[in-house]
């Protein structure tokens, strides 16, 4: 009778200590965790309530029926500890208080070890000796080892990745032997690494595959990313001229860095023309393809304005029958459109219709992409511009270097007339607010009328 009483008292003391430890762990985790993460304590609290319920039932049933309820009481309180202790230490103290974020793979491994320890404690409480689990046959051990080969390989590969840190969460990476687009690392767990591509597709790559494959990291050692745009131009044009056009075209393009400066190299000679490679830097890996697209638009407009065509493959010849009346109709339609635009300009109100007709035949169209500079303050003047399509923004640069928009001009409005008449330098900077088409009235055309 005395032995039974002693065992009962010991078991009660152990159960009371476990209950107190569980309540203390949940309470401390509540104060340590940030407010937004406290809802994660619902599961430990539920385990504690189930533990208390099991204790209540244990005291209501006869002594010979208490054993199962003792087991469930211990199981629930240790489950509450297994949930709340990692939250208290890892999320509350390390991450929230000390600002040291433990990698998720280590958190998962710690959580698994805690569960394993809790399982051993609960088994021991019901009289099962955990050491007997280690005395299994060699055959069973080999079977388990072979069945977990891939899992263990992913686990150790994940640990190696965290130890060597070839990439981290938030880095932009790409598998060297994959055709997949760039992907941002969103999670590294014990089994796999999750990437979110620029196409907003989530890719799950087993850690073992990452350990065997070369990885391109576009975020290390710096976030600078160099891009290349290849342009083929007929060899009739001087390389220095084309190089200056391309470098000027990329200037000010959103997403393109001014330092390091963009540069152009002559790539190769080709029967169809000369290959130029425009190289520039960006720090926006997520939007690298839209940046490339904007650069190509700038190149198209710059070469079009300068009268430099793209090289064409001359090995295919297409024959088109063009009637003279169609060509004449197209020319007359363009002249009529230009005449109507010029008639909206106040400066030309005094000109008779024949003079407007002559002027319409002498002006030419110059196109700009949105964001390009049409002219800058201080540039030499000799042309007047009339907005044919789109809008321009007139900006004034302050002493601090900040540009302020002071006016916006649309279809039929004009600028640059003083420089055309007097040759004075430009007094303001004008930039294309949208894709833009301008009628250019140069000095020769103005003198003609």
Image (spheres, rainbow, N blue to C red):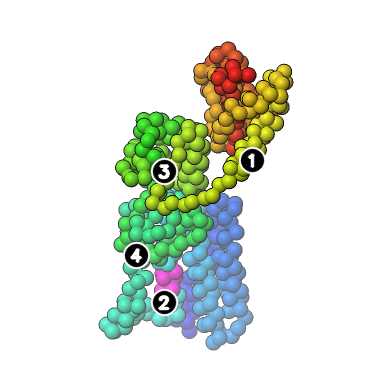
Instruction: Give 108 or 279, whichever is nearer the viewer.
Output: 279
When the figure is inspected, residue 266 is found, relative to residue 127, above or below; the finding is above
Mark toward the viewer: 4 or 3: 3
Horizontal relation, residue 432 to residue 225: left or right:
right
Residue 225 shows up from this direction:
no
Q: Which image quadrant: the C terminus?
A: top right
Mark toward the viewer: 3 or 2: 3
Residue 124 is marked as 2
Q: Badges 2 and 4: C-beta atoms under 8 Å apart?
A: no
Horizontal relation, residue 135 to residue 222: left or right:
left
Write the start and end of the magenta stretch as one range. Answer: 114-120
Instruction: Give 417 or 97, whichever is nearer the viewer.
Output: 417
Mark toward the viewer: 2 or 4: 4
Tag 4 residue:
208
- Mark 4 element type: helix
Tag 1 residue:
329
Q: How many marks?
A: 4
- Mark 1 element type: helix
Q: Badges 3 and 2: C-beta atoms under 8 Å apart?
A: no
Tag 3 residue:
311
Mark toward the viewer: 1 or 4: 1
């Amino acid at each position: 009778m005395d032995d039974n009483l002693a065992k009962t008292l010991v078991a009660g003391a152990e159960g009371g200590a476990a209950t107190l430890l569980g309540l203390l762990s949940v309470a401390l985790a509540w104060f340590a965790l940030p407010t937004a993460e406290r809802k994660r304590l619902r599961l430990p609290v539920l385990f504690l309530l189930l533990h208390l319920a099991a204790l209540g039932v244990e005291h209501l049933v006869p002594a010979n029926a208490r054993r199962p309820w003792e087991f469930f009481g211990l199981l629930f309180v240790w489950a509450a500890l297994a949930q709340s202790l990692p939250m208290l230490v890892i999320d509350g103290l390390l991450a929230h208080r000390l600002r040291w974020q433990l990698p998720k793979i280590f958190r998962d491994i710690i959580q698994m070890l805690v569960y394993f320890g809790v399982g051993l404690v609960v088994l021991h409480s019901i009289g099962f000796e955990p050491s007997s689990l280690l005395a299994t046959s060699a055959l069973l051990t080999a079977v388990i080892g072979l069945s977990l080969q891939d899992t263990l390989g992913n686990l150790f590969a994940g640990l190696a990745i965290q130890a060597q840190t070839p990439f981290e969460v938030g880095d932009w990476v790409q598998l060297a032997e994959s055709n997949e687009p760039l992907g941002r690392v969103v999670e590294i767990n014990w089994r796999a690494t999750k990437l979110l591509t620029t196409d907003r597709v989530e890719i799950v790559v087993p850690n073992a595959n990452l350990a065997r494959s070369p990885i391109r990291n576009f975020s290390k050692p710096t976030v600078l990313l160099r891009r290349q745009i290849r342009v083929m131009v007929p060899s009739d044009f001087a390389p220095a001229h084309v190089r200056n056009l391309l470098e000027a075209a990329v200037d000010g393009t959103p997403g393109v860095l001014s330092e390091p400066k963009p540069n152009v190299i002559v790539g190769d000679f080709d029967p169809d023309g000369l290959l130029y490679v425009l190289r520039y830097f960006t720090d926006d890996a997520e939007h690298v393809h839209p940046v490339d697209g904007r650069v190509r638009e700038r190149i198209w407009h710059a070469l079009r304005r300068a009268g430099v065509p793209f090289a064409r493959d001359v090995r295919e010849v297409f024959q088109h029958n063009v009637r003279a009346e169609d060509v004449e109709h197209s020319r007359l339609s363009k002249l009529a459109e230009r005449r109507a635009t010029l008639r909206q300009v106040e400066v030309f109100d005094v000109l008779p219709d024949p003079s407007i007709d002559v002027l319409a035949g002498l002006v030419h169209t110059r196109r700009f992409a949105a964001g390009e500079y049409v002219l800058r303050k201080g540039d030499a003047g000799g042309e007047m511009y009339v907005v044919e399509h789109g809008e321009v923004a007139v900006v004034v640069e302050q002493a601090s270097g900040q540009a302020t928009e002071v006016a916006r001009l649309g279809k039929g409005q004009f600028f640059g007339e003083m420089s055309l008449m007097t040759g004075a330098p430009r007094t303001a900077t004008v930039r294309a607010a949208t894709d833009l088409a301008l009628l250019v009235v140069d000095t020769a055309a103005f003198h003609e009328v």
